[in-house]
Amino acid sequence: MLAPGATATWVHAGVVLEDSPDLVAVCHLPGSGVLVPSGPRRGPRERLLLTGDVDGPPTTTTWWGDAVVKVHRWGEPWSVWRWLGPGGWSRDRYVNLEQPWVRTPAGFHTDDWTLDLVVVPSAGGWSVRTKDADELAWLHEVGALTADDVAEIEAAGERARTAAHAGAWPFGADWDRWLPDPAWPPPQLPPA
């Protein structure tokens, strides 16, 4: 898929809520440590950073906003995210298309595929819309992705869309099984 180092790496500290042979669920709590690569952003909305654009050491910051739980079924080219705020779970599910997760000594590794889906419950089913197709097209235009890469990513998006429309796991799952303990402190990154 993506050439090694085609895009810059972010690191997020999280709490593992479930780690089974079938799936892993990780929560990023508000205030959790995040390592952000530095350099000028390019592409649509100037949000993308290619490795060649990295111009210094990464910046340590913290996770902003509500807690987010990411559920990944081993081997799938996506994870499903849901935010947890003071009022409970968000209605929407966010499908992050990405390389299937790989276990590492530090946790889990994946490569983001840029294209995402937003899945919202609607009368009689689920509404699905694509997000960031313009960024995927831009990555192809600048040579960070081949036509085969784009086709693979779009095919993964269609499989995720089909799963969402069917209400397949984890779209209709009982997300309360992944509720983080409110007493947990936000995890931090280990010292460099």
Image (cartoon, rainbow, N blue to C red):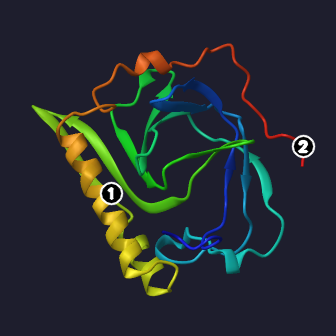
List x then y, in percent, for residue 151: 32, 71
Q: Is residue 112 left or right of residue 89?
A: right
- Numbered disc total: 2
Q: Identify the residue at the far left of this view.
A: 124
Q: Residue at x 18, y 42 (%)?
A: 165
List x then y, in percent, for residue 187: 74, 31
**Mark 1: amino acid:** Ala
Q: Residue at x 37, y 76 (%)?
A: 148
Which one is in front in this view, the residue at disc 1 or the one at disc 2?
A: 1
Q: Which residue is drawn at 65% across and 71% down?
A: 5
Residue 105 occupies quadrant: top right
Q: Identify the residue at the far front of this view.
A: 21
Q: In this view, does 113 lie to the left or right of 118?
A: right
Residue 180 occupies quadrant: top right
Reading the image, the residue beneath label 1 is: 156
Q: In this view, does 95 lie to the left or right of 191?
A: left
Residue 183 position (above or below residue 30): above
**Mark 2: amino acid:** Pro
Secondary structure beneath label 1:
helix
Label annotation for residue 191: 2
Residue 106 in sight in this render: yes
Q: Which residue is drawn at 61% across and 70% down?
A: 7
List x then y, in percent, for residue 1: 48, 69
Q: Considering depth in this image, is 82 or 19 the residue closer to the camera?
A: 19
Q: Considering depth in this image, is 65 or 137 the residue closer to the camera?
A: 137
- Among numbered discs 1 and 2, the one appearing first in the sequence: 1
